[in-house]
Image (cartoon, rainbow, N blue to C red):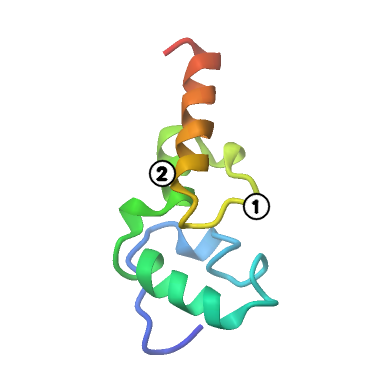
Amino acid sequence: MDITMTPKCEYYPICPFFTDSLVSGMPSTAKLLKEKYCCDGYSKCARYQVMVEAGEQYIEDSLFPNHEEKAQAIIARVKSEKGS
């Protein structure tokens, strides 16, 4: 992790996106997304939204912080399945 980045998201220690296990092949893109979502606007992060609204088990490895439409679809599906 870049020392200049200060994550504000409470889930960053367990997030595979933040810990680089999902983005090891694209460091520039990962850095920009981390700065935007992990350090500043974490409430807009697709992974964070799914975690809060549906649960950690519904976060797909292919879900990036900027995949808001995909996150909303996952949340809607889970809520529908749970009947809420």
Which residue is at the front of the view, 2 or 14? 2
Q: How many marks?
A: 2
Query: Mark number for residue 84?
Result: none
Q: Position of residue 17 (x, y in %)?
A: 57, 64
Cα distance between the residues tagged 1 and 2:
15 Å
Question: Residue 45 occupies which quadrant of the picture?
Answer: bottom left
Q: Position of residue 64 (x, y in %)?
A: 54, 57
Category of crowding for the residue at label 1, using alpha-carbon neighbours closer than 10 angstroms: few (below 14), some (14–19), many (at least 20): few
- Residue drawn at x 46%, y 41% is 69
| Quarter of the figure that contains the C terminus | top left
Picture layout, residue 79 above or below residue 61: above
Picture layout, residue 54 above or below residue 15: above
Query: Mark number for residue 49?
Result: 2
Q: Residue furthest front?
A: 69
Q: Which residue lies furthest to the top in this view?
A: 83
Label 1 vs 2, first from the N-terminus: 2
Q: What residue type is labelled 2?
A: Gln
- Residue drawn at x 66%, y 52% is 61
Category of crowding for the residue at label 2, using alpha-carbon neighbours closer than 10 angstroms: few (below 14), some (14–19), many (at least 20): many
Q: Judging from the image, what secondary structure is the residue with disc 2 in? A: helix
Q: Position of residue 73 (x, y in %)?
A: 50, 32
Disc 1: which residue: 62
